Amino acid sequence: MAVNPSYADLSMVLILMGAVLFASWRERLGLERTFLHASIRTVLQLFLAGYVIEAVFNLGHWYLVLTLLTLMSFVAAHEGAKRLPSKLAWAPAMAWFAIFAGTFVNTFVVTEIIIKIDPWWSPRYLIPLAGMIMGNALNSGALAGERFTSDLKTQTAEVETMLSLGFSSGEATMEIKRKAVKGALIPTLNSMFTVGIVHLPGMMTGQILSGASPVTATKYQIIVMFMITSTVLTSALILIELLRRGLFTKAEQVRHNLF
């Protein structure tokens, strides 16, 4: 049975953040307010999420599950769009579609083909799995999108030279695209190489702490690792393709005004 820490026990974790704040002040990092703000948001957001998800569990309606996931996707898109060119009007829509597509495809495969949850909207499985997928889609899209736009901005001259020689915008930006996707995949690949040896991932640790068999937790973690890898690649590729179409005109010219 999992140990349920009391609120008094939970408050003791503030000692760790106190040490972080002291170190930031001592080393003059100037991050005290940022750490404090982030800590407050972490506590409030997680408690809010916990109570909302518990309510959804208790009510047990499929439309509440889908509503919650939809709201999560819009918040993720809003955060992801912050890494994209601010002058690009369709940036939020691009971020949302990349996150939604990556999340929908991978969630469907995992819940309907691999795990086969019943009912299909079971909140105990669908919410945490879709949320995990969505978070990785957000991170990978943000990393890939930011790298793609920044490299395109610094290599505009080279890209325009290739365009003048008859290459399409897709061909002219292929190397930039490859680097952006590889950059987005690095954290995931590093995790795959060290998982189970250097660290135990969150889902596996959580299941073991909640009393599940380590072997069962391992099976779920393998599913999650491959699920995350697929999500990262899918979302990064989709967002970069949407960005390329948005940053070039139909005449295959760079939209300089968007940088």
Image (cartoon, grey):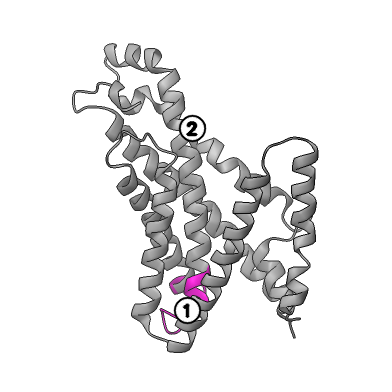
Amino acid identity at mark 1 = Pro
Q: Nearer the viewer, residue 182 or 27?
A: 27
Q: Nearer the viewer, residue 153 or 26?
A: 26
Q: Secondary structure at mark 2?
A: helix
Amino acid identity at mark 2 = Arg
Percent x, y for residue 34?
A: 62, 46
Percent x, y for residue 200?
A: 74, 61
Disc 2 crowd rating (10 Å Cα; few below 14, some 14-19, many 20+) is many
Q: Which residues are magenta?
A: 112-128
The numbered dot on residue 171 is none
The numbered dot on residue 147 is 2
Question: Which residue is under mark 1?
Answer: 123
Can see residue 198? no
Q: Residue furthest left?
A: 251
Residue 249 relative to residue 200: left or right: left
> Which residue is found at the position 39% from the left and 44% from the top?
81
> Which residue is found at the position 42% from the left and 84% from the top?
119
Q: Nearer the viewer, residue 49 or 122?
A: 49
Disc 1 crowd rating (10 Å Cα; few below 14, some 14-19, many 20+) is many
Can see residue 187? yes
Report which quarter residue 70 is drawn in: bottom left
Percent x, y for residue 164?
A: 27, 12
Tally the numbered discs.
2
> Which residue is found at the position 68% from the left and 74% from the top?
207
Percent x, y for residue 150?
A: 45, 27
Image height check: is 22 above or below 16? above
